[in-house]
Image (spheres, helix red, strand yellow):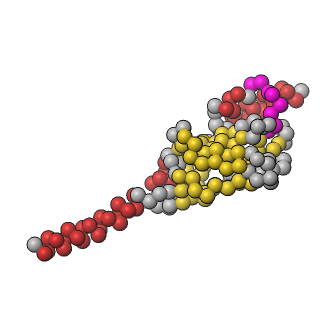
Amino acid sequence: MLRKLLVVFCLFLWVNPFQAQKDVKKFIALSGKITSAVWPDTLGKGLNKAVLEVFAEGKKIASDTASSSGVYKIKKIPCAPSIQFVFKEGNHLPKMIDVDFTEFGNDNGASLILEMDAFLYRNNDYLGVNFLKTKPFGKGIYSMKQKGVLWDDRHYYEMKARLDAVLKAYSE
């Protein structure tokens, strides 16, 4: 009887650490700078009071307002399989970035530190830019092997070409 109790106790100690590992909350720390730009330039100064909103499953899970120099920092974004980052400011075109963090959920790390800078073009009441409100400008996927986000360059260049075509028409 004592031997069975000892075996059960040892099994409890053996299994319990693995259970605790599954329940570890994973967080993402995100920081960067949001700048204002005039097309076709991508260089500009920090965008005061620009907002970064973070969404998971359609719900806002975090947000931050940039400082006077355009710097933002969110220390603890709860990890979700898919996260959308929305950069916006009233007088500028918004920018959405979608990142798949499914592999991060399976990774042993409890936190991930990301740096993401964004530039926003001034909005001069352009027609034809509504797609920026519904389609992500950038897409990425967390890679456990690389321990970071791999960006979909093809998608970025397609979206950039689409936006450039609209803005070029206004500059001519």
The residue positioned 73% from the left and 51% from the top of the image is 66
Q: How many marks?
A: 0
| Image coords of residue 165 (percent x, y) | 78, 29
Q: Main secondary structure of the magenta part?
A: loop
The residue positioned 74% from the left and 45% from the top of the image is 50
| Image coords of residue 96 (percent x, y) | 66, 39
Residue 138 in view: no
Task: Name the side, left or right, on which 28 lies relative to 158.
Answer: left
Residue 120, magenta (yes or no): no
Residue 127, magenta (yes or no): yes
Residue furthest to the right in view is 172
Task: Name the side, left or right, on which 42 lies relative to 1.
Answer: right
Residue 76 in view: yes
Task: Name the side, left or right, on which 40 lies relative to 152.
Answer: right
Residue 61 versus residue 28: which sits nearer the camera? 61
- 114 relative to 87, above or below: below
| Image coords of residue 151 (percent x, y) | 63, 46
Q: Quadrant of the image for the N terminus?
A: bottom left
- 27 relative to 162, above or below: below
Q: Quadrant of the image for the C terminus?
A: top right
Tell me where residue 39 sits by quadrant: top right
**Highlighted range, magenta:** 121-128
Tell me where residue 163 sits by quadrant: top right
- 29 relative to 100, above or below: below
The residue positioned 23% from the left and 70% from the top of the image is 9
